[in-house]
Amino acid sequence: MAPQLKRALIGGAAALSLALAGGHAITRIDGAPATIQNIAHLRAAPELAGLKLTKRKMIGGKKAHGTVTLTSAAPMGGVKVRLAAKSPRYIKVPKSVKVPAGKKLVRFPIRTARIARVGTGVVAAGLGGEVVKRRLTLTPRHYLTRLALDDYAVQGGTATGGTVALNKAAPAGGVRVTLASGNAKAQVKGQVKIPAGRKAAHFAILTQGVAADTEIKIAARYGQTLARGIVLTPGQAEVVHVPTKFTLHFDEFVDSSKARTLEAHIDINLPAPKGGLTLQVTSDQPGLLELAGGGRVTVPEGQTAAPFYIGFKQVAVVTPFRFTTTHNGVTVQSIVRNLAPGG
């Protein structure tokens, strides 16, 4: 206790007031100030700043880690953060994790179980009323990643086909992919085998005549189910070019503080006709993203895909974006990516 304050209390000083200034207590005794150092230092309790997973997609049965981060260093005694997993049968995390005193982050283990088909769960962290969630996708060791049909439209009564592909080469003994058709006018065998050491296999589709244009779904299943549509026509099939997908060759979060160009591809269903096929690509963030050539992307004659390039501006906050193209009445959108402040 400061001598001034002690004497005032013993002597029965009549006027005593406390005021906070710069995080320290200032006393006034009968109008005379006396500073008492380090009586009070106010600091907001840390809050949950983020949750990060070392992997967002992984083979079930393997281990990963997560990291919780606070807005400031944990006080004496540490800070306990609640943890939980949706789909606890396949994703297991501790009930809680403690951020040690003086630290802002801590890692925790994530254990997963083997899974028969692709599935997505959620890992969550909570502190007070704040909850942060992150998705975690689990896959079998081998699973179907692509189903492609040879034709978008064919005349009923003609033969066509399709291709199925795995995420990696089939193991010893090969893999049998289940096939199904939504209409008897387009027939497929019940299974197609991908031989050991191969990633893909072709299968036949036998069609029957139709009186009007008929769209039929062809499905394939191994670890996950994929489906594609084929149109049977009553006469000579019209060649219709449509966009099918965007492929983005960059991560989910793009550091906007680094000056560089992003690359993406746009695919079409059939080889481009003579002279090529031009698509107009747009973004939902035209003020931040600049598409080379004004977004006009030409798929060269005989090709089924073409690249395009994107420039971007620096942002102050995380900003999501995606791309869109429309051709022959078919609209395709890319998955969402994010511009991040970086630094």
Image (tube, rainbow, N blue to C red):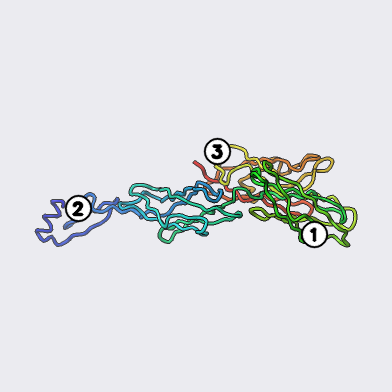
Chain-order first, disc 2 or disc 1: 2
> For the residue carrying disc 1, how many other residues have a C-alpha within 10 Å: few (<14), some (14-19), or many (20+)?
some
Among the two numbered marks 1 and 3 on one chain, the one whose residue lies closer to the N terminus? 1
Kind of residue at disc 1: Glu
State the residue position of label 3.
258
Residue type, numbered disc 2:
Pro
Observer-nearest of 152 and 60: 60
Q: Secondary structure at mark 2?
A: strand
| Foreground label between 1 and 3 | 1
Q: Nearer the viewer, residue 69 or 166?
A: 166
Mark 2–mark 3 Cα distance, whole angstroms, equals: 53 Å
Residue at image x 49%, y 58%? 85
The first of marks 2 and 3 along the sequence is 2
Q: Are circles 2 and 3 on residues that touch, CB within 8 Å?
A: no
**Residue found 78% across the figure and 40% down from its top:** 303
**Residue 334 at what x, y percent from top left?**
66, 50
Instruction: Please name the residue that numbered disc 1 is placed on.
Output: 215
Disc 2 designates what residue? 33
How far is the residue under mark 2 from the one under mark 1?
88 Å
